[in-house]
Amino acid sequence: MSRLEEHAKRSGIAWMVLSATAYSMFTIFGKNVLEELDAVDVLVWRFLLAVPLAWVVVVVRARFGGPGPFSVAWLPRFTAGVLFGGVAWLAFAGLDQLPGALYIVIIYTYPAMVAVGATLLGRPAGRQVWVAVLITLVGIALTVPEVLDGAGGATVVGLLFTLGNALTYAAYVIYSERLVTDGGDGLVASAWSLTGSLAFAVVAAAVSWPMHAPTSLGGYGSAVGLAAISTVLASMAFFLGVRRLGPSSAALVATTEPVLTLIWVVLILDETLKPVQLVGATLV
């Protein structure tokens, strides 16, 4: 590996860790807002706040010599964003019917799906990746019986939403990697992707009209945190990380997220895990 490749790998890992840290707050912000709104309302507020912020970043960078809004092929990124809008809706729907700790463990079936999908598309994962995937799946298997027993208010519907969330997110990771390898700027690509997600959210809101707003200052604060930290920052760091690492490696680096999320869930939401769930989470 050349020095340039090694630097790209290190920076890719750093971007993915930053993305995972920002995403790890998603469960906290999401759970708080879902106490006041339904999944579609949260979806709309997330992207309604995030998209202007993302474009402010792009425009300010462009004013100082950075790439402009049309420096990338916008339509594929917009399309990826529409897919991510579906991912986000499934996330809120699953999170609304599962304890935060269980949600974050089950969602991590997605690295296995990424590895399988990348292999089918001609980018086979290495042996170490498959060993890690196997360990992850064992950890997931230890948590599913708790869902079927209804532990902590968990529902089978919530499990299905979350598995659907994992599947669509895996597709998004693979599709996004195929886009960012063309050399386009990651931050501009992210802004277009978030715009596509907003388009999905607007359609979803039109179908489920009327739309509602948070009812408390804490609800608005969580909505802003969800948009600024767990959407704009997380998405932009994600694009920069996947471009440097590829989908399978990026997905595995992102598994630092459940550890952080479980810490936030225990400390902030005061949730607990049963011993078997702790074993499963440790394996994941």
Image: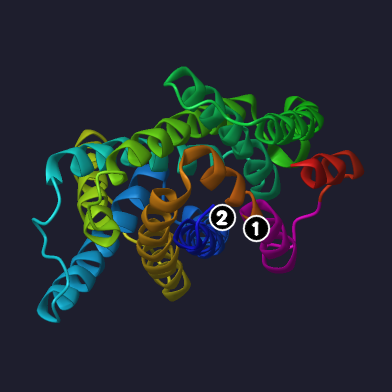
Q: How many other residues sit within 10 Å of disc 1, few (<14), some (14-19) or many (≥20)?
A: many
Q: Is residue 209 visible?
A: no
The mark that comes first in sequence, 2 or 1, is 2
Q: Residue 127 appears in which quarter of the rendering?
A: top right
- 265 drawn magenta: yes
Residue extent of the magenta highlight:
257-272
Q: Which residue is mark 1?
A: 261
Which amino acid type corresponds to the residue marked 2 in the rendered image? Thr
The quadrant of the picture occupied by the C terminus is top right
**Element type where label 1 sits in the image:** helix
Q: In this rendered view, identify the residue nearer to me: 122 or 188.
A: 122
Q: Residue at x 67, y 64 (%)?
A: 264
Q: Residue 47 appears in which quarter of the rendering?
A: bottom left
Determine whether, in the image, residue 158 is placed left or right of residue 55: right
Q: Is residue 171 visible?
A: yes
Is there a contact, CB below 8 Å, between mark 2 and mark 1? Answer: yes
**Element type where label 2 sits in the image:** helix
Q: Which residue is mark 2?
A: 27
Name the mark on residue 247: none
How far apart, in angstroms, are the residues tagged by discs 2 and 1?
7 Å
> x%, y% of residue 66?
17, 72
Q: Main secondary structure of the magenta part?
A: helix
> x%, y% of residue 50?
29, 62
Q: In this rendered view, identify the residue nearer to me: 211 or 146.
A: 146
> x%, y% of residue 95?
55, 44
Q: Is residue 22 above or below residue 164?
A: below
